[in-house]
Image: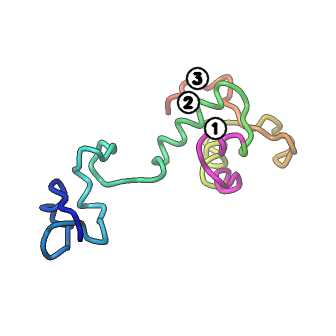
Amino acid sequence: CVAPCPGVAEWPWNQWPNRRGTGGRISVESVAECPWNGWPNGRGIRTKPRQAVLRGLILELCALRPFTAAELCKVLGRSDPRELTRSHLKPMREAGQIELRYPESVKHPHQAYLVPENAPENRHA
């Protein structure tokens, strides 16, 4: 027997015929406007931060001290340093937002990323 769920029973995504419980699926659109959805734009639930948010965090961290890709992954809750490098660190480096600690050797064993000293405007980009 399924106990009634008063706050959920009337929601349009509840597909149980007697409206006493919840259906097996929840679409993102059905929870976009719920008060517990912390995303301010009401577009749904996201598991990863948007690119601009993540890159802003990378800039803030690298302004504090040089970080390796593995260290950034740990702090940012990511699992693959190579993916972080490909998706974020390399494009940010090419745009001049961050630079390599050892620019003469991209594959230096202690390679790290830092914000250039002459680019304070990048810290909040």
Q: Secondary structure at mark 2?
A: helix
Left or right placement of residue 27 versus residue 118 in this view: left
- Label disc, if present, on residue 17 of the rendered structure: none
- Label disc, if present, on residue 122 of the rendered structure: 2
Residue drawn 14% across the image and 68% down it:
19
Q: Which residues are magenta?
A: 71-85
3D distance between C-alphas at marks 3 and 2: 5 Å
Q: Secondary structure at mark 1?
A: loop
Q: Nearer the viewer, residue 115 or 64?
A: 64
Label 1 Cα neighbours within 10 Å, binned few <14 / some 14-19 / many ≥20: few
Amino acid bearing label 2: Asn
Label 3 Cα neighbours within 10 Å, binned few <14 / some 14-19 / many ≥20: few
The residue singled out by tag 1 in the image is 96
Label 2 Cα neighbours within 10 Å, binned few <14 / some 14-19 / many ≥20: some
Q: Nearer the viewer, residue 65 or 14?
A: 14
3D distance between C-alphas at marks 1 and 2: 9 Å
The residue singled out by tag 3 in the image is 120
